Amino acid sequence: MEDAGQDEGFERFLKRAANLGISDCTTNLSLHPQSPTSCLGHSLTVSHFPDAGGRGLAAVRDIKKGELVLRVPKSVLITRDSLLKDEKLCSFVNNNTYSSLSPTQILAVCLLYEMGKGKSSWWYPYLMHLPRSYDVLASFSEFEMQALQVDDAIWTAEKAVSKAKSEWKEANSLMDALKLKPQLLTFRAWIWASATISSRALHIPWDEAGCLCPVGDLFNYAAPGEESDDLENAVHLMNASSLEDTSLSNGETTDDFIGDQPDTGLERLTDGGFDENMAAYCFYARKNYKKGTQVLLGYGTYTNLELLEHYGFLLNENPNDKVFIPLEPSMYSFISWPKVSMYIHQDGKPSFALLSALRLWATLPNQRRSISHLVYSGSRLSVYNEISVLKWISKNCAMILSNLPTVIEEDSLLLSTINKIENLDKPTELGKLLCASGGEARAFVEASDLQKGKNGSELMFSGKTKRAMERWKLAVQWRISYKKTLIDCISYCTVTINSLSSQNFLATRTK
């Protein structure tokens, strides 16, 4: 929660934004003059949502889906072009010596250079209200990466850290030439700049690095839900579009999860864009909103690990999350689906491609060609085949869980302990909590800079340690979600197997 001083500063920022032409008024401004104290108030207001992203934008009236809710003029957007109006910065950046740097690296350097100007920067009111740190994967320590537990996730985090360090080193010579302040030359400062871009930059057609959009980046994230399922179904229906709807001899037909073919105009996954006619970045309501509810923005379709990597947060219920289970190399030799399409959905159900591929794999080799059209149309081949596939999935999910160092119950208890530590009022209680916890809590103490207080018995937190604990917490939350998906998949397979077995038993008895 921000203190009074921060709130006052933010109000001044909103007033400055109004003077620059940022507006949430959807009608002619000459008929509805902009408020002299804020750029908001016609459609939106800043509010705090403790359990849904923190500070965000709430509707001050009922808003209809598709309605324009915010305009940010091009002149206010922070881009490479706007920052390079500084002659000194422009002369260095345009030097051929630094031509190998990517547009995003250049924007990160420009952002740090602008931060170094302090109050003399034209964007100072905006820059001062950016987060001071981000919990993106590139900021994870070795301990925090290992806390993810899953090899693929650890590898993704290690790759993010390695990439960030490489890009930082490549940009060092330019930052040295610009004589940035020492604190702006550190890897931590580079993580801040690059994470600001990865988590807040919006797409613009003239610069692949994107732009920072004052006020527009106050929208919190809404995960695309049903439309992502429709998209998967549409892809697989197109794969089977030339095939007739086939029924099997035992009466089984295409699985229920295929669903009806969606409209050709699928919902867009983002809710804003630069409008050349308005010369502004425009934001639209992604659905109907009642007065007082939070207005959200769809950044795109991301798994929780991708959200951690690029934005530094995750969702407790993310309909786009997925778990990949290892398949035998031979399974890929007779299927046309890409590996990325074969996974377990967040609710525990296997994806269309995974089920179909395993149905084909579980068929005798000399029969695969003759029944492949049934597989591609989403049909079950037989009760025996379906049960075999589900048993294989369940067994492999259980194997993955058994190879992880902790079980979900232990993780949940650890997460509860971390939450208690974050809310402690008395430092003397910290030592008791950590001592009562398992080895991972003790490992955290060793990996962080927890220090004893004046009486020698109190453990004190530094700001650095608080940030480390938040990243540790995110890692634990991620692995809980990962394990829950596997557990839900086992449950789904078990229930379906039992149902199929019962149906088969009844069918046999009636013959």
Image (cartoon, rainbow, N blue to C red):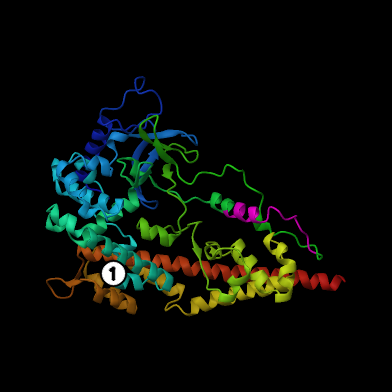
Q: Is residue 169 above or below residue 325?
A: above
> Residue 30: which quarter of the image?
top left
Q: Is residue 251 above or below residue 260?
A: below
The answer to which of 87 and 320 lies nearer the viewer is: 87
The answer to which of 474 and 47 lies nearer the viewer is: 474
Residue 185 % position (x, y):
17, 58
| Residue interval drawn in magenta | 232-248
Q: Is residue 380 above or below residue 392?
A: above
> Residue 479: which quarter of the image?
bottom left
**Residue farthest toward the top in the current orientation of the protein:** 31
Residue 235 % position (x, y):
60, 54
Would you say residue 437 sits in the magenta stretch? no
Q: Answer with left or right where residue 501 lies relative to residue 448.
A: right
Q: Is residue 283 above or below residue 132?
A: above
Q: Which residue is mark 1?
A: 141
**Disc 1 element:** loop
Quadrant in which the C terminus is drawn = bottom right
Residue 385 % position (x, y):
71, 72
Q: Answer with left or right where residue 102 lies relative to residue 238.
A: left
Q: Is residue 7 visible?
A: no
Residue type, numbered disc 1: Ser
